[in-house]
Image (cartoon, rainbow, N blue to C red):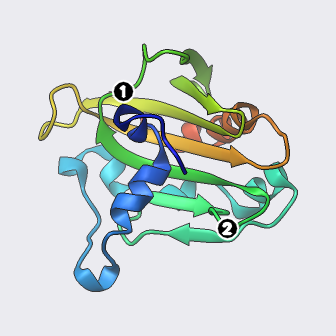
Amino acid sequence: MAVADAAGCVLLAGCTATVAGQGTADQGIKHLNFNGMPLGKLDACSLLADDFVTKQFGASLPKTTMSSKHYCEWGGSVHDAGDVNLSFAAYKPSAGRPGTTQENLGGRTSTVIPLDATLCGIETSLGEDWGPGESGSKQMAAIDVTTTDGKDPCAVARTVATAAWPKLPAVS
């Protein structure tokens, strides 16, 4: 997947997968606990049922997980129907970035980030400062949708976020 700039990279769960993919469970990747904050205890794959994702694309999509449990992907770059990535990470929210909109999805303030005709990201903050790292970093949940059949990726991403976000821990 191509991303226009480095700042855009943090928007996409695909970037999380790339970083997480640098190692394997054999190399000791562990479940990041986010300093005991709520996302540290949550498995990203638990937020969406496989049949729900299948319904969005009209095709069964293979699921890929990372040993950290902070990333789940349905589809992938080799799947013809498209893909959905759901990830948890700590970074600065993207609100205010050109082209983004703020929307209430699944009862949460969400930033919708249309990247091109086939790719859209949506993120929401759990409202807690991450602590270590860059100032202003928050616990973030992100959805990244790629479509290959002419469907609007942001429409699909909104549907997915509306289903997933209510299962996230409360915003502090």
Q: Residue at x 55, y 16 (%)?
A: 99
At numbered mark 1, what does the secondary structure look like: helix, strand or loop?
loop
Q: Is residue 16 left or right of residue 157?
A: left
Q: Residue at x 70, y 40 (%)?
A: 118
Kindly report the distance in space between the C-alpha atoms of the residues bearing marks 1 and 2.
29 Å
Q: Quadrant of residue 46?
A: bottom right
Type of amino acid at the residue the image marks with label 1: Pro
Q: Quadrant of residue 55?
A: bottom right
Measuring from the top left, give residue 122's x and y in whole percent: 55, 33
Q: Is residue 155 left or right of residue 73?
A: right
Measuring from the top left, give residue 49's x and y in whole percent: 68, 59
Q: Nearer the viewer, mark 1 or mark 2?
A: 2
Which residue is identified by label 1? 93
**Eyeballing the image, is 144 above or below 112?**
below
**Nearest to the observer: residue 76 or residue 155:** 76
Say if mark 1 contacts mark 2, CB within 8 Å.
no
**Eyeballing the image, is 70 above or below 115?**
below
At numbered mark 2, what does the secondary structure look like: helix, strand or loop?
loop
Task: Tell me if mark 1 has few (under 14), some (14-19) or many (20+) residues whose alpha carbon lies within 10 angstroms of its own.
Answer: many
**Nearest to the observer: residue 125 or residue 80:** 80
> Which corner quadrant holds the C terminus?
top left
**Eyeballing the image, is 92 above or below 61?**
above
Q: Is residue 163 left or right of residue 111?
A: right
Type of amino acid at the residue the image marks with label 2: Val
Which residue is identified by label 2? 78
Measuring from the top left, give residue 107's x and y in whole percent: 58, 25
Q: Residue at x 23, y 79 (%)?
A: 28
Label disc, if present, on residue 141 of the rendered structure: none
Q: Compare marks 1 and 2 and give the one earlier in the sequence.
A: 2
Q: Quadrant of residue 101?
A: top right
Q: Is residue 169 visible?
A: no
